[in-house]
Image: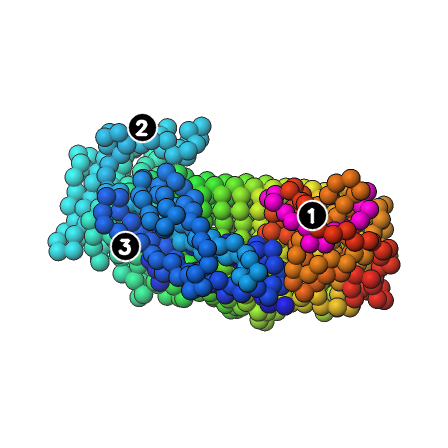
Amino acid sequence: MKKIILMLVTIALAATGCEQDDFPFSPDFPEEFPGNGQGASNLKDPALAWSADSFEATLGAGNSFPTLTNMYSVGVTYESSQTEVATIGSNGAITLLGSGSTLISAKSAADDTYSASTASYMLTVLIASGSGSDGDPLTFESTGDPSSDDDISTTTFKGRITITYSQTGDATVQGDSYGYVSVDGNKVTVNNTGGEVLIYELTGATDNGSFKVYGAKKQAILLNGVSLTNPDGAAINNQCKKRTFVVVQGTNTLSDGASAAYTKNDDEDLKAVFFSESQLIFSGPGLLTVNALNAQGKAGISSDDYIRMMDCPTVKVNAGSTAGNGLKGKDYVQLSNGTLVVSIAADMAKGISTDDYVLVEGGTHMVSSTGGVAYDDEDAEYTGTSCVKADNYFAMTGGTLILKNTGDGGKGIRAGSYDFDETNHTLSDSYITGGTLNITVTGREVNDVSAKGVKIGWVTKEGTGDRATVTGNAGKLVISGGTITVNSSYGEGLEVKGDLTFDGGETYVSSNSEDAINCQGGLTVNKGFVYAFSSGNDAMDSNGNTNLNGGYVMAICTKGAPEVAIDANTEGGKKLYINKGATLVAYGGLESGYSASQNVYSMSGKAGAWNALHDGKSFIAAFKAPSNISSVIVSAPSLSSGYQGVSVSGEAKCGGVWAVDGITGGSSVSLSNYTGGAGGPGGGPGGGRP
C-alpha cells in the first residue's frame, strides 16, 4: 500500500511568514493523502504546487505573488482562510485588504483519473512600522483576552524609550529622561531602578549589538522594524522577572552567531537568542524572525516562566543543527492566537518545549524537525527530537497545529513524563476538544528510540523484549472534538500509555509499520469518527479492554494474520466489546473471543467507492473503501443490509472516509454472519497479539 501523506501539512505551510527556502516543508506531496477518501488509492496525484511555501507582502506596494503549478490542468478552486487579510479571485488574483496572515489554497476535486488535492502557502500581509494604537504612544489595543493580565490593553505605561541601532555608528536613545540606558557601541543596557512601567522600543539595524534590560515591574518591548544580531550570544536578554509584553510591528529579525559563546555575567541565565527570566506575551501585527546559529545548544526563544502567543503576530524560529530547542516556556506554552513557525535541526532538540503543559487555543502554528537521535549525558540514555514536548500534558481546544518530523526516532507530540509524575505525584490527562491537528512522522527507530506520531504518558517494565511485563503506566488522552490526522511511516501513529477515550471529533491515524492506534490501558469509543489504518501491524491495539459503545469506527489492517483490525489483550484476560450503538467497519479480522451485543456481519462492498449500511428504513452511514479492499466486517444498530456504490452529497467526515448525511443510490447487497478471527473479513484462525 502506498504511504499515506498528510495533505493538510501542505495546506499549513501557508501559515509561516518565512522565506521560501528556510522552512523545510515541501508544497508538493506526490503520494495520496487519506483526506481524498481513497486510502490506498491508485488514482493519479494532480501534483498541485505553489512556487513558495510562504510569502510576505506589503499593503499598498507592488508584490509578485507565488504562482501555481498545475501540470495536468485539472479544475481548481481558490480559497483564502482570512478574507479580511486578503481575497483570491477565481483566476487566482490576490487582493490585499489588511495586515495579518492567511492561508491561500488551490483545491481540485477527485475524478476517475486524479485524486483530490490541496496545495497552499502562507501569505503574511505587513504594514509600515508604527507606534501604539490610535496614535497614543503609551497604549495598545486589546490582544484578545481583556479579562486576563496577559492582555496588554489592561496595562498603563508611564513612558517610552526608543533605541535606534546603527550599522555605521553607535545606537541612539530617545525618551530616556530617567537616565536608565547605557550604550556601548550597539550594546544597550537598561537598568530600571525606579520601578516605572515602561515601553522599550527597538528599531534600526546592527550586526554587532544587543539589548539587555533589568527591572522590577512589568514592561513592554516593542520590536518596530529592528534587525539585531549579537555574534557573542543573546540578542535580547531580559533579566526583569515581571511580565514582559513583546509587541511585534513591521519586520524584525533577532540572531546570534555561529561562534557565539554565551558567556555568563555572574549567575545570569543565557539560554536563547531571545531569553527572558519572566513571562513573554507576544502580540502585534508584524513579523519576528529569530535565528539560532550557535554551537552551544542554545534555543531560539526561551523563558524561565511561561510563553503566550496573543492576537496577530507571526513569529518564526529557526534553530540550526548545532543549536537547541526552538521555543521553550518553562512553566507552560499557551498558543491563543497568531502564527508560530518553528524549525529545528539539531539531534534531541524540541520544537515547542515546556516542563509542564502546552495548550493550543487558536491561531495557525507549525513545527518542523529534521534532527535525529543522540546520547543524552544528563539522562544517560538515547533520545530523539519532538515537534512538541510537554512534561505534563498536551491540550488543544482550537486553532491549527501542523507538525512534521523527518528525523529518526522523532515524534510529533511527546507529552507526559515519568520524571514529572514522580516529582508531582500526578500526571494530568491530555485532551483535544477542538481545532485541527495534523502530524506527519517519517523517521525510523534508532538505538531503541522509535518514531511516533503521538506518544502520551510513560510505562515501566520488568524484563526485556516480548517477555517484558508492565509494572506501571500513566498518561491518558481524551479526544472529544477537533479534526486530527496522524501519519507515521515506521512507528505507531497514536500511542497512549494509559487509557484512550474517544468522545467526539474526527480522528484519522495511519502507520505503515506498526499499530496505527495503540494504548497500554483501555480503549473506549463513545462518540465521534475514528479511522485507523495499518499495513504493518494491528489497526487498533489495546492491552486493556476495547469498548466500542458508539460513534463510527473504521479499522483497516492489510498485514494479515496474526495481525487484526482490532486487537485486545485476550492473553491477559481482556476483550473486545462491540456494544449496542456502535457503527463498525473493519478489514483484517477481529480479535478472537470478542463479545457483541449487536449483530456482526461480513459484507461485500465496492473497492475505492462509497458503500453504505442500511437499517431497512434509511441509511445509517456511508464509508469510503480503499481502492484495493471490498469485503469488510460491519456492525451497526439495527443493521439489515449493505449498499455498494452509493452517492454522498453530505459532508465527508474523518478525512473523507465517513458520511452520515446525503447518502443516496447504490445497489443493495446481503450480509452474512461473521465468524471471527484474523486474516480477512470472514476470518481464519483466531489471532491478534496483545
Taking the magenta stretch, the answer to whether it contains residue 641 is yes
Q: Kindly report the secondary structure that dominates the magenta region of the rendered protein.
A: loop
**Residue 130: x %, y % from top left:** 23, 39
Badge nearest the viewer, 1 or 2 = 1
Q: Amino acid at mark 3?
A: Ser
Q: Residue at x 18, y 37 (%)?
A: 176
SS label for mark 3: loop
Query: Going from the N terminus, do you reach mark 1 or mark 2 first?
Result: 2
Q: Residue 262: where, in percent of width, then height?
A: 33, 59
Q: Amino acid at mark 2?
A: Thr
Q: Which residues are magenta?
A: 637-651
Kindly identify the residue that appears in the image at 74 percent across and 52 percent down.
667
Mark-to-mark CA distance, 1 and 2: 65 Å
**As drawn, is 155 to the left or to the right of 190?**
right
How would you rate the neighbour count of disc 1 (Cα within 10 Å): few for under 14, some for 14-19, many for 20 or more? few
Q: Residues within 10 Å of mark 2 (few under 14, many from 20)?
A: few
Label of residue 156 in the image: 2
* Element at label 2: loop
Q: Is residue 511 magenta?
A: no
Give the residue pinned by disc 1. 665
Task: Check contact, mark 1 vs mark 2: CB within 8 A.
Answer: no
Q: Amino acid at mark 1?
A: Gly
Query: Where residue 554 sits: x, y (%)?
Result: 70, 53
Q: Quadrant of the N terminus?
A: bottom right
Q: Nearer the viewer, residue 422 or 39?
A: 39
**Quadrant of res 450:** bottom right
Disc sitting over residue 64 in the figure: 3
Instruction: Choose between 329 and 50: the one closer to the eye.
Output: 50
